[in-house]
Amino acid sequence: MKKVTEETVNAFYNSLPFKKANMEIIMENIKKRLEELRTELRNECISYGELAELQSLTEYIDKDDVELLQAAGVPEDLS
């Protein structure tokens, strides 16, 4: 019997066909949530919790989206 390790579990999971579909769904949900947060920001009714959530999603914000990046507290790239 083959020993089950984290490596073998990860290899199995990565071989599953639904993984790509799940990642696409996750990315769609993140983009949708970013737009919801943008609406709250524009309506000037964004909460501290939502700002914290926005900060946690900075890696998914387009690099040219100054509005969300600024609200998330990401410093400007001056280089």
Image: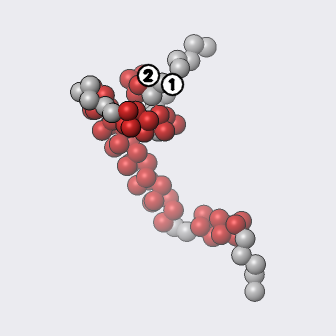
Q: Is residue 70 above or below residue 23?
A: above
Q: CA distance from mark 1 to mark 2?
A: 6 Å
| Residue type at numbered disc 2 | Gln
Q: Is residue 25 above or below residue 53?
A: below
Outermost residue toward the bottom?
1
**What percent of the width, then of the height, locates residue 34?**
37, 38
- Secondary structure beneath dot 1 equals loop
- Secondary structure beneath dot 2 equals helix
Q: Locate residue 20 relative to residue 44 in the image: left or right.
A: right
User: Which of these two is toward me, 4 or 65?
Assistant: 4
- Labelled disc at residue 70: 2
Q: Locate residue 40 relative to residue 3 in the image: left or right.
A: left
| Residue type at numbered disc 1 | Val
Crowd class of label 2 (few under 14; some 14 to 19; many from 20; radius 10 Å): few
Q: In which quadrant of the rendered view does residue 71 lie? A: top left
Outermost residue toward the left?
43
User: Which of these two is toward me, 24 or 26?
Assistant: 26
- Labelled disc at residue 74: 1
